[in-house]
Amino acid sequence: MADIKVVAKGSHDTLATLSGTSVKLKEPSVVLIKVSPNDVLEVKREGTSVVIHLKNGEVIIIEDFFSETAATDNSLVFGDESDQLIWARFTNDEGLLLDAVNYQPLENIEPLLYGDNYNPLAWAAIPVTAGGILAWADSGSNSTDESDSDSDSDSDSDSDSDS
């Protein structure tokens, strides 16, 4: 049986470490399977699962790796005893499914995790910030109008004293 480690992309926490042939995902994750890429016969999608056939006949199933209703962001990585990591990519850079799995070497899984500054609520702050800027700009234009009227009266008083 293969050692399987599931790491949450958002929190970077290890969600599961097990020795087995199946795991079910509940949130965006990196699934690290301690198997040499040379021992993998086939990796394919079956419904919402990833099915991995090893050359020794073992089958590993990762349930809910894909979704039929929404975009998912899970990553599959193979690693051997020498810590060589290979990312099994199912999508291209635009997020579209590839016809065949693309294998790419990695130094570590960090690029697959969400950054420390990643915050799904950050987008909610944009309308609030924009509203605050607009309110500030509006209040600034009102004070400019008042100062314009003062400067007009000053220029009138100057012209009166000149005559």
Image: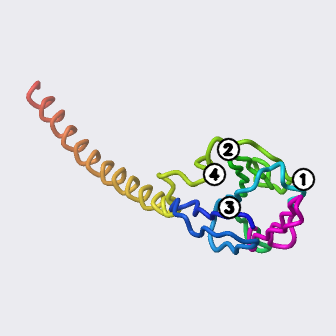
Tell me the magenta residue range.
44-65
57 relative to 163, above or below: below
Identify the residue under disc 3. 31
Question: Which three-letter amino acid code belongs to the residue tagged 2?
Answer: Ser
Identify the residue under disc 2. 82
Question: Which three-letter amino acid code belongs to the residue tagged 4?
Answer: Leu
Identify the residue under disc 4. 112
Which coloring applies here?
rainbow
Q: Mark 1 Cα within 10 Å, few/some/many (few <14, many 20+)?
A: few
**From the image, which quarter does the C terminus lie in?**
top left
Q: Secondary structure at mark 3?
A: strand
As rendered, which of 57 and 31 lies closer to the eye? 57
Can you name the residue that lies furthest to the left here?
Answer: 161
Question: Which numbered disc, 4 or 3, marks the residue closer to the eye?
Answer: 3
Place of residue 106 in the rendered image (x, y in percent of width and height, measured from the top left): 68, 43
Which label number is shown at residue 10? none
Q: State if disc 1 and disc 4 touch (CB < 8 Å).
A: no
Sequence-wise, the earlier of marks 1 and 2 is 2
As rendered, which of 13 and 59 lies closer to the eye? 59
Looking at the image, which residue is at 56% across and 54% down? 114
Instruction: Tell whether 132 sits left or right of 50.
Output: left
Question: Which three-letter amino acid code belongs to the residue tagged 3?
Answer: Val
Q: State if disc 3 and disc 4 touch (CB < 8 Å).
A: no
Q: Secondary structure at mark 4?
A: helix
As rendered, which of 24 and 90 lies closer to the eye? 24
Q: Give how far apart the Cα atoms at labels 2 and 3 are.
A: 18 Å
Sequence-wise, the earlier of marks 4 and 2 is 2
Identify the residue under disc 1. 100
Place of residue 55 in the rendered image (x, y in percent of width and height, measured from the top left): 89, 58
